[in-house]
Image (tube, rainbow, N blue to C red):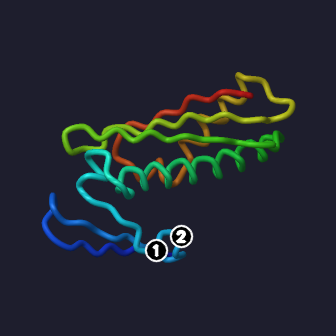
């Protein structure tokens, strides 16, 4: 399986701007720029997209891990914070909350960590990844 995204950038790094699109067209000529990446400009940025990929992949993996352990979840909600420090992505922090009938907080945390370790996007990263799990 292969998936793709494309980017077209016009102008210089700081004064120019880009448009990013995905194969599915969920992103279709979505704008980004220096300001949307490093300041508070309108548009997306690579770090935000990386956070979306990690939270999405992790959440799906966690539902499979929970179900496989006999605890089908009612709902899993995950936030991912990406840390960019001196031009390097240094950390991806997952915060997950779940409604899972019949599970203890200890087991929920154990399975949350198992899902983090098995997540395909976690395996892709060359940075610290963490998960904080909260049972709702």
Disc assigned to residue 109: none
Q: Residue at x 75, y 43 (%)?
A: 75
**Residue 14's spot in the image, x, y percent?**
15, 58
Q: Secondary structure at mark 1?
A: loop
Position of 27 relative to 76 (above/below): below
Left of 80 or right of it: where is 11? left
Q: Residue at x 58, y 47 (%)?
A: 58
Seen as rendered, the residue at the extreme left is 12
Locate the C terminus and report the quarter of the image it occupies.
top right
The 10 Å Cα crowd at callout 2, few under 14, some 14 to 19, many 20 or more, is few
Quick check: marks 2 and 1 in contact, CB under 8 Å? Answer: yes
Left of 14 or right of it: where is 28? right
**Residue 18's spot in the image, x, y percent?**
28, 68
The residue carrying mark 2 is 26
The 10 Å Cα crowd at callout 1, few under 14, some 14 to 19, many 20 or more, is some
Q: In the image shown, does 87 or 129 lie closer to the viewer?
A: 87
Position of 31 relative to 60 (above/below): below
**How far is the residue under mark 2 from the one under mark 1?**
6 Å
Q: Residue at x 47, y 47 (%)?
A: 122
Left of 63 or right of it: where is 101? right
Q: In the image shown, does 52 or 129 lie closer to the viewer?
A: 52
**Which of the 4 image quadrants contains residue 13?**
bottom left
**Residue 10's spot in the image, x, y percent?**
20, 73
Q: Residue at x 52, y 54 (%)?
A: 120
The residue carrying mark 1 is 28
Q: In the image shown, does 92 or 40 lie closer to the viewer?
A: 40
**Residue 125's spot in the image, x, y percent?**
39, 49
Q: Secondary structure at mark 2?
A: loop
């Amino acid at each position: 399986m292969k998936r793709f995204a494309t980017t077209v950038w016009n102008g210089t790094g700081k004064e120019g701007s880009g448009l990013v699109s995905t194969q599915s067209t969920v992103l279709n000529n979505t704008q980004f720029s220096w300001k949307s990446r490093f300041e508070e400009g309108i548009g997306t940025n690579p770090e935000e997209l990386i956070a979306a990929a990690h939270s999405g992949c992790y959440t799906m993996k966690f539902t499979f891990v929970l179900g496989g352990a006999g605890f089908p979840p009612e709902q899993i909600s995950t936030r991912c914070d990406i840390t960019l420090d001196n031009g390097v992505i240094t950390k991806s922090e997952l915060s997950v909350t779940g409604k899972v009938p019949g599970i203890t907080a200890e087991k929920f945390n154990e399975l949350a960590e198992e899902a983090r370790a098995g997540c395909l996007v976690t395996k892709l990263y060359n940075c610290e990844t963490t998960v904080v799990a909260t049972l709702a």
